[in-house]
Image (cartoon, rainbow, N blue to C red):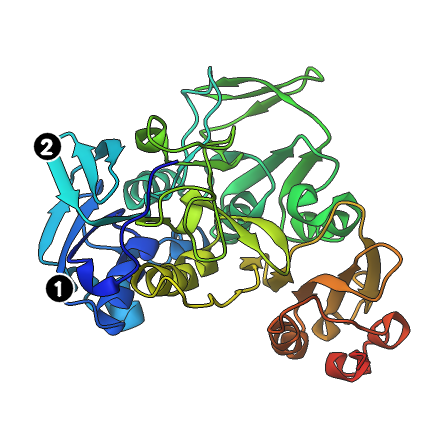
């Protein structure tokens, strides 16, 4: 194990931030907000200023230009750095006892500390070269140009991004088919039973949904399914997930098989150097409340950097344990999820997904098996439950909730909390 630098933050005089997205921008903001007046270098692979990624799918067709983070957050993060290097990719890392050296395709940068915020890259399986992906602004530009009314789109993957794009495209007059290998949409993050409750939305909006079937081949003009069916297409979108963009860290720090870097509650590598932090998609954080929490969601990139910088500048500080949070807009429905469900958790339904009065919405509660400990809350079109869930996951441990009371949609969720 490498020795850590001195605990005194006053001896930290330079920081290099690698990653020009939300996590990187928030790191720059946090460094200056917490009083760091040393030299800050930002390295970003994209050649444009930081922008927000959720609108790329949620507003694919009605926002033709990037949503700049300087406008969204009210802070010009690039102006807070002393040295900004855009269009430069990190290629390697050397971690010393008192410093770090980031190798890039345009030279190297040495600093006292590093914050890794390089995000992720979309998964495109081998042989799927004819499929497009949606991850960065140029991807959105390309896809937007192809999705004209009457065009045929096949989306492979009914996760968060696939569902959002399917709904947006169908509303614009595109003929959309969605292929999902799992038994239901969102079966990965929500489980098949809950994901199945979203399946009717597809047909209601004219989208053909094919679940429980693998893709055998992606062609320039369509998709061959493993069951022999042929889905013609003008555009094929691969929306089958993303992986942490951490190849440049591989020789310096231990990575999980999927490329994520395990970090502690203060976003430092577990058992590793304290003058290195990782935030956003690259980090798999150990939460005292929820266990290992993967990156990959906007809220983690938004709020994680503040805690990472606090730990970097004040090694003895107790980090705030932010609850995992994800939001999505699909087929006119607003979804928000707090916490992290376990695969063997008990499920309690609050409201009826099949009710004709869709305005009432519904919520799913996950409990640690056989206990009153609430692990996660998914709210669909129930904004009051969103606020209640946010407050529930602010304590040091999992909230304890009366299951019977919580199952009654007429009872405020906060009223079901056990003392």
| Badge 1 element | helix
* Disc 2 packing (10 Å; few <14; some 14–19; many ≥20): few
Which residue corresponds to the image point at 70% horizontal and 74% vertical from the top-left?
Answer: 359
In which quadrant will I find the N terminus?
top left
* Disc 1 packing (10 Å; few <14; some 14–19; many ≥20): few
Q: Quadrant of residue 145?
A: top left
Could you say where residue 64 lies in the image, as x and y percent from the top left?
29, 54
Could you say where residue 111 lies in the image, as x and y percent from the top left?
16, 47
In which quadrant will I find the C terminus?
bottom right
Q: Which mark is residue 295?
A: none
Number of marks = 2
Which residue corresponds to the image point at 74% horizontal and 66% vertical from the top-left?
Answer: 363
Residue wearing tag 2? 106
Residue wearing tag 1? 79
- Left or right? Give the position of 385 relative to 98: right
Vertical position of residue 169 compared to residue 63: above or below: above
Vertical position of residue 385 compared to residue 161: above or below: below
The answer to which of marks 2 and 1 sits earlier in the sequence is: 1
Q: Quadrant of residue 312?
A: bottom left
Query: Which sits in the foreground, 242 or 321?
Result: 321
| Badge 2 element | loop
Vertical position of residue 41 compared to residue 123: above or below: below
Which residue corresponds to the image point at 26% horizontal and 40% vertical from the top-left?
Answer: 97
- Left or right? Give the position of 2 relative to 237: left
Q: Is residue 68 visible?
A: no
Between the C-alphas of marks 2 and 1, the distance is 21 Å
Q: Quadrant of residue 227?
A: top right
């Amino acid at each position: 194990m490498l020795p850590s630098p001195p605990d005194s933050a006053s001896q930290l005089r330079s920081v290099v931030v690698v990653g020009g997205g939300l996590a990187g921008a928030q790191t720059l903001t946090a460094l200056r907000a917490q009083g760091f007046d040393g030299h800050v270098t930002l390295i970003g692979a994209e050649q444009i200023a930081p922008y927000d990624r959720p609108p790329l799918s949620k507003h694919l067709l009605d926002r033709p230009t990037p949503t700049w983070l300087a406008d969204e957050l009210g802070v010009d993060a690039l102006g807070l750095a002393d040295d900004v290097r855009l269009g430069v990719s990190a290629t390697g890392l050397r971690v010393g006892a008192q410093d770090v050296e980031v190798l890039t395709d345009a030279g190297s940068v040495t600093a006292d500390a590093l914050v890794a915020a390089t995000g992720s890259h979309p998964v495109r399986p081998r042989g799927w070269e004819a499929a497009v992906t949606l991850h960065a602004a140029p991807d959105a530009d390309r896809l937007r140009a192809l999705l004209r009314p009457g065009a045929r789109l096949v989306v492979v993957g009914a996760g968060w991004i696939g569902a959002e794009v399917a709904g947006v495209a169908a509303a614009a007059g595109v003929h959309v088919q969605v292929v999902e290998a799992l038994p239901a949409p969102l079966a990965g993050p929500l489980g098949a039973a809950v994901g199945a409750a979203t399946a009717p939305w597809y047909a209601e909006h004219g989208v053909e949904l094919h679940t429980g079937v693998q893709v055998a081949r992606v062609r320039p003009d369509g998709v061959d399914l493993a069951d022999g069916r042929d889905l013609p297409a003008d555009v094929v979108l691969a929306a089958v997930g993303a992986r942490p963009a951490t190849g440049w860290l591989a020789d310096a720090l231990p990575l999980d098989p999927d490329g994520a870097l395990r970090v502690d509650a203060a976003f430092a590598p577990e058992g590793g150097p304290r003058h290195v932090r990782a935030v956003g998609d690259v980090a798999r954080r150990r939460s005292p409340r929820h266990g290992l929490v993967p990156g990959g969601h906007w809220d983690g990139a938004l709020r994680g950097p503040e805690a990472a910088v606090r730990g970097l500048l004040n090694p003895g500080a107790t980090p705030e344990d932010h609850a995992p949070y994800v939001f999505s807009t699909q087929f006119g429905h607003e979804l928000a999820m707090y916490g992290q469900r376990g695969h063997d958790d008990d499920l309690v339904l609050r409201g009826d997904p099949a009710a004709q009065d869709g305005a009432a919405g519904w919520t799913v509660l996950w409990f640690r098996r056989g206990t009153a400990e609430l692990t996660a809350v998914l709210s669909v079109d129930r904004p009051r439950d969103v606020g209640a869930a946010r407050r529930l996951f602010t304590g040091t441990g999992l909230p304890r909730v009366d299951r019977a009371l919580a199952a009654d949609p007429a009872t405020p969720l906060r009223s079901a909390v056990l003392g």
